Amino acid sequence: MKPLRIYAVAYLIFLYAPIALLPLFAFNDGTIIAFPLQGFTTKWFAELSGNKALLSAVGNSLFIAAMTAIFATLLGICAARAGAMADFPGKRGIIGFVMLPLVLPEIIVATSLLIIMRQVLGLDLSNWTVIAAHVLICMPFSIAILNGAFQNLDPALEEAALDLGENRWSAFRLVILPLVMPGIISSLLISFTISLDEFIIAFFLTGTNPTMPVYIWGLLRFPGQLPVVMALGTILVTLSILLLALAEYFRRRGLARAGVTDSGGFL
Amino acid sequence: MSTLISLSQVEKYYGDYHALRGIDLEIRSGEFFSLLGPSGCGKTTLLRTIAGFEGVSGGAIRIDGKDMAGVPPNLRPTNMVFQSYAIFPHLSVAENVAFGLRRSGLSKTDKARAVTEALEMVGLGGFGKRAAHALSGGQRQRVALARALILKPKVLLLDEPLSALDKKMREQMQVELIKLQRQVGITFILVTHDQEEALVMSDRIAVMFDGEIGQMADPETLYRRPASRRVAEFIGQMNFLQARIVDDAGASLMLEVAGLGRTRVEASQATADARTGACVVGLRPETLGILFEGEAPRLGQEVIDAVVDEVVYYGDMTYYHVHIPGVAEPLKLSMKNITGRPVLDIGTSTRVAWDPRALVLLGG
């Protein structure tokens, strides 16, 4: 038992210590990322807010993440509902293909998408090309979350609504949608988070305006800018944790509402 | 009473599986009708075709004279109480009950009054503000009833509505459902696998096996004059003895029954197929009686000797398995434990009274 416990603790330190260093150096009064610490400062955060190029990159990323979250979740709702309620030939195969981007190497996806968009379709790279690619990789997560929400529903609920005079669409809106809403919010938040810090695909497909991760990567060539990156990283980590916690909260509330026991999730 | 629902030659296939095989059925207005059968016999499928959740592969369903082909559930004059109750968990009790009134065009106060009335009718007055997921099984059942009845449907369809309740609650709800049905005067169609439930509640019962109707009759006829050995075995307990028709005189039959000897029965006690082919005699356990010390057979009863093989004591009743010397099949019989009557021991030799008027002659 003892060695296992030591292993578990060591594992957690290895996993989270580097992230803990982010805020440490973000508030450190020195350009060199090294111990001993120089003293407390918030000037890196101030410098951050004055950096026009960075702010524009952040703006791009937020726009891309928001659009990705909306499209991935909309498509995820359709796929999860079809998967949970309808029965059609080849269903398992189709769902399998939709889930595939979860395990495809992103660099391969990015390269092939670049070729398709530039060479085959002749599109100009822009925020929208990034959005399209991000929807592709966020969809599996969205479906995984929404599948849970849809499969927990008693099919008799929709039939009851039909029986009580509603048509298919209004039954969906009045009964199904409110019951899966926590799953939808959870899916929006997770897709948003994934898209926000995605680098490889954005690096390949971004146009003249880089996204935030791409811009940060560019900054790394200038060591003097490193503490600013740390400050930005601190904000991002805090934001990510908040969003994921919120997503999990909504997922659990959805389970409680449907009156079923928890059967796993992302957190 | 006029016919409200008529099914003619209704067929249903799921792929190769033949779920309903030429169902003909007429259900009268105001009737409490049950579809009874073992699981997989097609009773729920039949109910769902009437509700419109399943299309038919052949034949026609007419409700109140109108052909229901292609009419979706929301446009049929039927409402359903689901086996799982399907109470909307995100709505309150009152919102659940009011759900069907959304498109009614009633004013807010009229709706509220209708909801209050419906809840009071099912014994849930004052429960309107409760959250639906905080209700017990019996209360959910009542909400489901109120939600369906508030629309005043021509037909209320109930899919195994009592199967999720415990025994006490189930018996209580049986009585309440009968009262409710009389009060509202709506036609009820109940699907159940519980023969006792069907006998207690129904005006008429259709017993289904393998997608076909085995017999359709009122509870008493079904119990006393089952149309086949299968129906007799499914409903209540029945003893079967090998038999042979010695003489068929048209209005009456002379039988030779294993262990019971020769006896004469009315033609109405025999099914048509029993008179033409192989046959067995069926006797209900309660029509047989052990003759205790000092008891004499009643007028019309016959007496045979038997030996007690098994004794099952139930408090108010004792169930005996006995055998007639020389007959392989044991006879089951039940005796009321009235004062002064002993419980016999296994191995006791005794006399058993039986009544030729109580037996049925079945094919098989």
Image (cartoon, grey):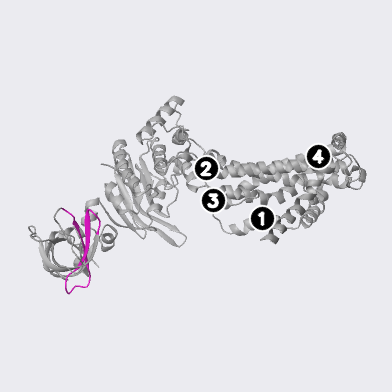
Name the residue at 51% across, 45% down.
Answer: A259
Q: Are marks 1 and 3 on the same chain?
A: yes
Whole-angstrom CA distance, mark 4 to mark 2, is 41 Å
Name the element at disc 1: helix
Q: Which mark is residue A58?
A: 4
Residue assigned mark 1: A99
Badge 4 vs badge 2, beta-carbon distance below 8 Å: no
Badge 3 vs badge 4, beta-carbon distance below 8 Å: no
Tell me the chain of label 2: A
**Front one among A173 and B4:** A173
Q: Which mark is residue B89?
A: none
Q: Earlier in the sequence, mark 1 or mark 3?
A: 3
Badge 2 vs badge 3, beta-carbon distance below 8 Å: no
Q: Is residue A265 visible?
A: yes
Image quadrant holding the N terminus of chain B, namely top left
Residue assigned mark 2: A168
Q: Is residue B266 visible?
A: no
Q: Earlier in the sequence, mark 1 or mark 4?
A: 4
**Front one among B344 and B261:** B344
